[in-house]
Image (cartoon, coloured by chain):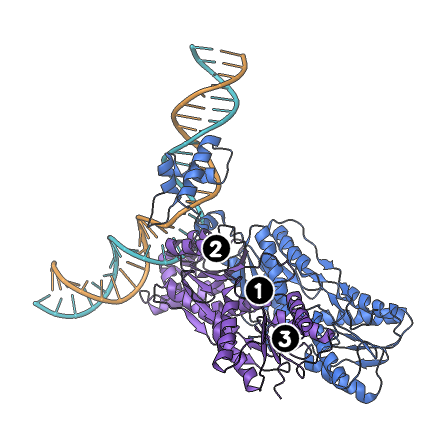
Chain colours: A purple, B blue, C cyan, D orange
Amino acid sequence: MVFMKEKATSFDIAHLAGVSQSTVSRALNNSPLVNQETRDRVQRIAKELNYKVDKNASNLRKQKSSTIALLLFEDPTSDDSMINPFFLAMLGSITRACAQANYDLLVSFQNLEDDWHAEYEDSNKADGIILLGYGDYTDYQTKVAQLESQGTHFVRWGAPDEAHPGVSIGCDNYQGGQSITSHLIGLGKTSFAFIGDNGDHAPEFKARFNGYYETLRSHGFAESCVQRNAISTEDAGSEAVKSLLQSGELPQAIVCASDLIAMGVLRALRQANVNVPYDVAVVGYDNIAVSAYTTPSLTTVQQNTKLAGELLVNTLLKAINNEDVQDYLMPADVIVRQSCGSE
Amino acid sequence: MVFMKEKATSFDIAHLAGVSQSTVSRALNNSPLVNQETRDRVQRIAKELNYKVDKNASNLRKQKSSTIALLLFEDPTSDDSMINPFFLAMLGSITRACAQANYDLLVSFQNLEDDWHAEYEDSNKADGIILLGYGDYTDYQTKVAQLESQGTHFVRWGAPDEAHPGVSIGCDNYQGGQSITSHLIGLGKTSFAFIGDNGDHAPEFKARFNGYYETLRSHGFAESCVQRNAISTEDAGSEAVKSLLQSGELPQAIVCASDLIAMGVLRALRQANVNVPYDVAVVGYDNIAVSAYTTPSLTTVQQNTKLAGELLVNTLLKAINNEDVQDYLMPADVIVRQSCGSE
DNA sequence: TAAAGTTAACAAATCGTTATATTCTGCTCA
DNA sequence: TGAGCAGAATATAACGATTTGTTAACTTTA
């Protein structure tokens, strides 16, 4: 084992193996154009020298980086310490999916106003881009359109939508709204309220509401109380419950547009000494880690982050290889816990 | 605005600006060797063409990638869907710190048995490496030693330790154990139990315990009940409480080695109708997101992930520039909530 | 005015690969 | 025997930037 101060190059190996440098390259890439014996010899020497192909040189020559860039757009209001747990979970699964496909993953947070739309693929840092975040800003839409027109390969997390060009992978929020509402109806609930955003801020919430609303209708129910001004925060959920209580009309079931909202709802109900689930059932949406630990634990709708990560990565890789790609809507699963009073 | 099918190179710009290609490079890098006027002209044209420096070419020439690799080592037993929330938070802050320093971040999960120790810096993918995870495996230690001997630039998350070579950034678990224990003593508690690992699995836990134990001693208290076989899971915490209850010796305060353990403790106590904090105070460690939402909310010890991320990145950058670097132990802060019965 | 100094730009070498074109060796077969 | 043809390895040309001499064009100074 020779100690080398300098990093070994393919020339060093060529020298030691007594072949040309191009043969080394071929041998290391398992080309059939170089015979078995020399191939083995070259590979053995490379291993001994702890040689690793220089990625920059290789990428430059191949015009391909085997790297994917993940761009995370955050709610601009949230501070550093509090990152949306759902997106963090996605980050985890995307990382794994990339590793599986032998791609590297570049991660970065982006402000919507930056010109991220040109940065990555144009500089050959990455072969394609995954966009992750709530895309409810016009600024975002125009930039996505620009990506599209540049011919950049990218995949977007979210619902398929004419306003957003490009391929999207998302979770079926409409069906999620349906499923959780059906579950409540199945438990014999007859009066309902939805607490959350009406969809002005994010299309995700609108779909959830629609699923809920249509399911009620198809079963012959109407919303008993409507509370539609809550953004997706704990305090908003709490406030909404307070005004429900003041109006005196408490339904048998409260459907929240997100788990965070549901947290606030649970808190306000506890403070008012309303028992969940006996007096009122409460359900959330997202299945964030916290929801398993609240008192009572929260029945909610889960988005399959593992599958989502795999779909995002695999779809992007297809796009990079110029194969046909399609939008995909994943099913949403109801996670039954205590807050709906299932048993 | 000219539409170009091919990506623009510095030669295209040189041609359009009527200067040589090297002048373009200089101009774009704001070199004083090219005069203001041509510099402006070149930059304007580059912008018009939507030109971006090819990172691979640039890196190859400069022998520097302006990229940091983050290697996450996970508890091998945990499954895909459940990633340690503390490490995810760290990932978030590291990502931000990198962006601030104008470095890209390559993220990957690693199995301890893979030969990650050579992969990144040797291939020039990254200028340095951040190691994040519980480093309580001998396999890990030998590979870290190898990194050190290779001259690879890296920084490790964890406590400074002779057994682990290289620079480390960590949180002062001893002081954290002290602080939380002092807080309980200040509240007038006189009998205590520690639930958690004795340090066999991770040095982090050992330090927490030592801080707790020494603080008791220095105030003239002894541990009333000892329960030291719990690994860091919710169920383990739950089991530990059950055997405490069976022995009939419930202390006034229970110090848990992690928030996850504390979750289990709270659950078991609730099931046994023991009121927290009135009958017994409970505190955790980590301040994971869940801990603010339990009932009662959990008093715990916080590790400053934002600072940690910045320190890891900045220390690594110093190491890359061959400046002197030092281990750093961050202070741990007590977060007072309901479970300790503070008011 | 000639010598020296300063500034601006250029041509060419370089980084470490991979891909293409080319040569070389030995073998078969007419 | 020599044309034809594989098989195996080599030589060489990109890839797109940065950097190192070097030159050309001005300014200044003696």
Numbered mark located on residue A138 in the image: 2
Same subunit: marks 3 and 2:
yes
Query: Residue B4: which disc?
Result: none
Q: Split into 4 quadrants, where in the image is the C terminus of chain B?
A: bottom right
Provide the chain ID for the residue under circle 2.
A
Q: Pick whichever of labels 3 and 2 is earlier in the sequence.
A: 2
Question: Which element is circle 2 on?
Answer: helix
Assess disc 1: are there few (<14), some (14-19) or many (≥20) residues with their C-alpha within 10 Å of its C-alpha: many
Asked which secondary structure carries label 1, the reply is strand
Q: Which element is circle 3 on? A: helix
Left or right of B62 in this view: B168? right
Quadrant of res B42: top left
Residue under numbered circle 3? A291
Could you give the CA–CA distance between mark 1 and mark 3, rounded to whole angstroms? 29 Å
- The amino acid sitting under disc 1 is Leu
Identify the disc placed on residue B71. Answer: 1
Image x and y of residue A338, in percent: 64, 82
Of D15 and A340, the residue lying toward us: A340
> Residue B95: image x %, image y %?
58, 58
| B337 left or right of D11 in image | right
Callout 2 amino acid: Thr
Q: Is residue A224 above or below residue A129?
A: below
- Distance from disc 3 to disc 2, alpha carbons, whole Å, reads 32 Å
Question: Local crowd at mark 2 within 10 Å, few (<14), some, or many (≥20)?
Answer: few
Asked whether the residues under the numbered discs 3 and 2 touch, taking CB atoms below 8 Å apart as contact, a structural biologist would say: no
Q: In the image, which is nearer the foreground, mark 3 or mark 2?
A: 2
Decide: is B49 above or below B132. above
Q: Residue at image x 49%, y 33%? A: B33
Could you say where residue B27 lies in the image, as x and y percent from the top left? 46, 37
Which quadrant of the structure image shows residue B339?
bottom right
| Residue type for callout 3 | Ser
B201 in relation to C15, above or below: below
